[in-house]
Amino acid sequence: AAKQSGRARVQLFDDAMCEATERRVTAERALQAALEIDPIDQLPVWFQPIVSLESKQVVGAEALVRLRGTGGDLIAPGVFIPLAEETGMIVPLGEHVLRTALAQLVAWGDTVPYMSVNVSPKQLAEPEFVPMLTEALSRSGLADASRLVLEITETSMLERGIDLRDRLLAVKALGVRLALDDFGTGYSSLTWLQSVPADIVKLDCSFVVGLSHDQDKASIISAVLWLAQALNMSVVAEGVEDLADAEALTRAGCPAAQGWFFGRPVEAAAWDPGRRQVLGLPSRQAPAVS
Ligand code: C2E
Ligand code: MG
Ligand code: MG
Ligand code: MG
């Protein structure tokens, strides 16, 4: 009987592996076709608002790419970005996202002050990255390069095992700003914080979701806010899903936030430029201490 169930387990495992491999191959094909045939239609870039907790206005947008599967369904970046990184397709994919996001930022004008674009370390490591960025900026007609923010993650940078600091300095020299994405999830966040010339820290959603009834999370957030201020960086809290967490962040003095409570990622056509004012939020109160 043991042998029997052992075999059954192996069978199940094989099936699961086949399914995963199949899904992978399907996504890889869809990605390749999308890049070759029609990236604008098949790799749509969606946008999520970033909101100031002080002025309660939209201060920025994060560009988030999706992949249209062969059936018309949308595939999440969590599925195909790792694939794109492994295969090198992240380079043309990232360029497509960057150009699309810049064009959208210019089209929106000052109703959206800045645009945040995720960049994989594999893209950054490309020798052509800075010349490509320079050209994309100038072609977009964006007058003020600081309205572009590039988001990088700690773990992915360390995985590369190469020093991308010079590359980041070259990006900064163009006037583009940098954000540390998913901050707090890496294993050497403090080293990372002092070694990268970043302007913004994006506090990972794991510290934000449920913050209003979790004193430990609230303490971590206060500490990060203090640290960021000492290092002259701004903070955006990710993953704000309800009013209670938005209020707790506001009380803690967090300057900006992003999450389903303020708005889900949407395609550009569904973005409401008139909705700069986010209603229903309390004014910031004086902090309890100092
Ligand atoms: P990220 O850069 O940390 O982006 C934030 C993710 O959190 C997005 O997932 C967003 O939809 C999701 N999110 C927003 N608000 C909430 C909320 O209130 N609660 C929760 N639970 N989640 C929320 P998405 O769009 O699936 O993207 C996943 C990741 O894929 C991104 O994480 C980013 O690392 C990567 N990605 C997306 N687009 C690109 C791209 O163009 N280039 C690269 N290199 N990576 C990308
Ligand atoms: Mg991001
Ligand atoms: Mg993030
Ligand atoms: Mg995140």
Image: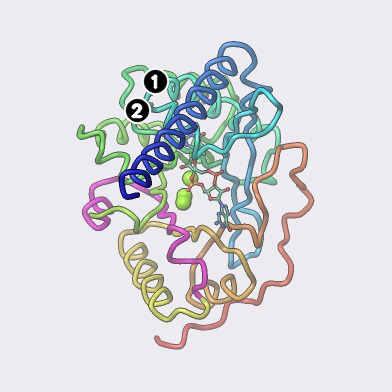
Q: Three-letter amino acid code at disc 1?
A: Gly
In the image, residue 89 lies at what x, y percent? Answer: 44, 20
Q: Nearer the viewer, residue 207 or 48?
A: 207
Closer to the camera in the image, 246 or 289: 246
Q: From which residue to which does the magenta span run?
A: 189-211
Quick one: quadrant of the C terminus?
bottom left
Q: Which of 247/177 is in front?
A: 247
On residue 166, which mark appears? Answer: none
* Distance from mark 1 CB to nearest ligand 1 atom below 8 Å: no
Tag 2 secondary structure: helix
Above or below, 250 against 120 in this view is below
Q: Are marks 2 and 1 in contact (CB under 8 Å)?
A: yes
Q: Nearer the viewer, mark 2 or mark 1?
A: 1
Q: Quadrant of residue 188?
A: bottom left
Q: Could you tell me the amino acid type at mark 2? A: Lys
Q: Looking at the image, which residue is at 43% across and 22% down?
A: 91
In this rendering, is residue 233 above or below 123? below
Q: Is residue 56 magenta?
A: no
Q: Circle 1 is placed at which residue position?
A: 88
Mark 2 surroundings: few (<14), some (14-19) or many (≥20) residues within 10 A = some
Q: Is residue 282 above or below residue 100?
A: below
Q: Is residue 116 left or right of residue 119?
A: right
Question: What residue sits right under mark 2 in the picture?
Answer: 122
- Could you say where residue 132 lies in the image, as x and y percent from the top left? 44, 19
Q: Residue furthest top?
A: 36
